[in-house]
């Protein structure tokens, strides 16, 4: 009988460990590789002023659950990334996601700005920053950014395959092309 109790106890411990590992993986912060353009495309034709749509878009982008946002003058969106109180994310997870690799901030800021302009029709300016003043921030302007791209934001919105090929793989993941755009929109510390 004791033998069965030990086996049952051992199985409980193993199953608990597997369960906690699975829930840890679920709490990972989304990166570019985790994003589905098909999923994002369901938010196309959103507008500033529709807070539920803006919140849904931001929760589907890299850095998803560690942000606050505000709408300024009905045409500008300011997104602040940082760990909130009463969240499942720790400062260590936040720092590991954003600061462990040299170009994570560049890639995610550019990716998120492009996605916001593609999906939100009336946003003219997007500011992305960290939760403290000494951390990187950048402001993108719709018209100026769109001029640097081969197609209009509308073309990318209507064709996720083009969006993936030209913007995600061709610009965001290409250090050379990313730097050309970031030269016009410098990230400030």
Image (cartoon, rainbow, N blue to C red):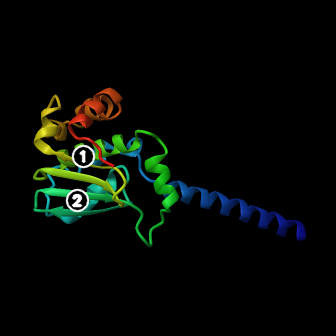
Q: Whole-percent x and y of residue 41?
A: 24, 46
In this view, the residue in front, 129 or 11, is 129
The image shows residue 109 at horizontal and vertical percentages of: 31, 46
- Identify whether 177 is placed above or below 11: above
For the residue pair 11 and 34, the one nearer the viewer reads as 34
Position of residue 166 relative to residue 72, above or below, is above
Q: In this view of the protein, can residue 75 be seen by the observer?
A: yes
Numbered label attached to residue 57: none
Name the quadrant containing residue 50.
bottom left
Crowding at mark 2 (Cα within 10 Å: few <14, some 14-19, many 20+): many
x then y, percent, for residue 19: 61, 60
**Mark pair 2, 1: CA separation:** 13 Å
The extreme right residue here reads 2
Residue at the spot 49% in from the left edge and 61% down from the top edge: 91
Q: Residue at x 23, y 31 (%)?
A: 162
Instruction: Tell me if 43 is positioned left or right of 132 in this view.
Output: left
Q: Can residue 43 be seen?
A: no
Q: Relative to residue 140, is residue 10 drawn left or right? A: right
Please provide percent x and percent y for residue 7: 82, 63
Q: Secondary structure at mark 1?
A: helix
Q: Residues within 10 Å of mark 1 (few under 14, many from 20)?
A: many
Evaluate if marks 2 and 1 touch, with contact meaning CB atoms under 8 Å apart. Answer: no
Residue at the spot 43% in from the left edge and 49% down from the top edge: 98
Left or right: 1 as drawn, with respect to 32:
right
Mark 2 or mark 1, earlier in chain: 2
The residue indicated by pointer 2 is 54
Comparing 129 with 152, the one in front is 129
Q: Which residue is mark 1?
A: 113
């Amino acid at each position: 009988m004791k033998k069965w109790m030990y086996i049952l106890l051992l199985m409980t411990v193993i199953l608990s460990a597997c369960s906690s590992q699975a829930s840890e993986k679920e709490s990972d912060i989304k990166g570019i590789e985790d994003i589905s353009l098909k999923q994002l495309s369901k938010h196309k034709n959103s507008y500033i002023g529709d807070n539920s749509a803006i919140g849904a878009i931001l929760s589907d982008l890299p850095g998803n659950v560690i942000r606050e946002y505000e709408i300024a003058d009905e045409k500008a969106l300011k997104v602040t990334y940082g760990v909130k109180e009463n969240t499942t994310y720790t400062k260590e997870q936040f720092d590991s996601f954003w600061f462990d690799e040299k170009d994570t901030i560049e890639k995610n800021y550019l990716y998120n700005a492009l996605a916001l302009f593609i999906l939100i029709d009336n946003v003219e300016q997007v500011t992305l920053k960290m939760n403290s003043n000494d951390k990187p921030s950048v402001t993108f302007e719709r018209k100026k950014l769109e001029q640097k791209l081969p197609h209009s934001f509308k073309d990318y919105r209507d064709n996720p395959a083009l969006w993936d090929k030209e913007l995600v793989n061709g610009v965001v993941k290409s250090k050379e092309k990313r730097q050309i755009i970031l030269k016009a929109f410098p990230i400030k510390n």
